[in-house]
Amino acid sequence: MIAGAHLLLYSKDPEADRAFFKTVLEFPSIDLGEGWLIFALPPAELAVHPGDGEFVQMHAEHPMLGTLLYLMCDDLSNVIRSLKGKGVDCATPVEADWGTSTSVRLPSGGEIGLYEPTHPTMIEARSI
């Protein structure tokens, strides 16, 4: 039986991005040694979107499907304000049918998504 999921986030500066997840986002972590942190994630869900087949990452000599990380929140304006208070810039929020989204720039220069969904989520469904 599947016991969990392990998300890989590829970074050009993993040490700086690990520090961001630990100190700015305050994700709990364990240190496997030499600063290699594994983070606990908030409850998660998976959506499978159509792609062009070009978005892949090689892992263990196999082409793996590409993945995007979107953190979800209940009050995007408040989270953006909190992140700005910690010196983190977010892109201008964009409205869509499925919610309001922004992106958060990591210290490495990469970005992750952040959004307030307007659609039902599996996180909500599981808590009922």
Image (spheres, grey):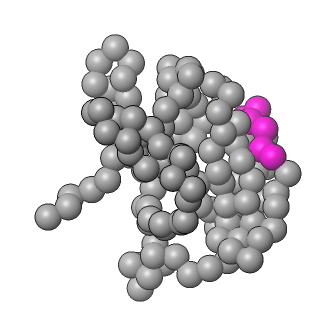
* Magenta residue check for 87: yes
Q: In the rendered view, would you say 123 is above or below 32?
A: below
Q: Would residue 123 be found to the left or right of residue 117 on screen?
A: left
Q: In the rendered view, would you say 99 is above or below 70?
A: below
Residue at 50% across, 23% down:
14
Q: Quadrant of the N terminus?
A: bottom left
Residue at 32% across, 53% down:
5
> What is the quadrant of residue 122 in the picture?
bottom left
Q: Position of residue 71 (x, y in %)?
A: 57, 54
Residue at 34% across, 35% down:
59
- Visible residue check, residue 125: yes
Q: In the rendered view, would you say 119 is above or below 51?
A: below
> What is the quadrant of residue 78 in the picture?
bottom right
Q: Position of residue 77 (x, y in %)?
A: 78, 59
- Visible residue check, residue 19: no
Q: Position of residue 43 (x, y in %)?
A: 43, 61
Viewer-closest of 113 and 80: 113
Q: Would residue 91 be found to the left or right of residue 52 on screen?
A: right
Q: Quadrant of the C terminus?
A: bottom left
Outermost residue, bottom direction?
Answer: 128
Viewer-closest of 23 and 17: 17
Q: In the rendered view, would you say 124 is above or below 22?
A: below
Q: Would residue 55 be found to the left or right of residue 57 on screen?
A: right
Viewer-closest of 72 and 47: 47
Residue at 47% across, 43% down:
56
Q: Position of residue 84 (x, y in %)?
A: 78, 40
* Magenta residue check for 105: no
Magenta part of the chain: 86-91
> What is the quadrant of residue 94 in the picture?
bottom right
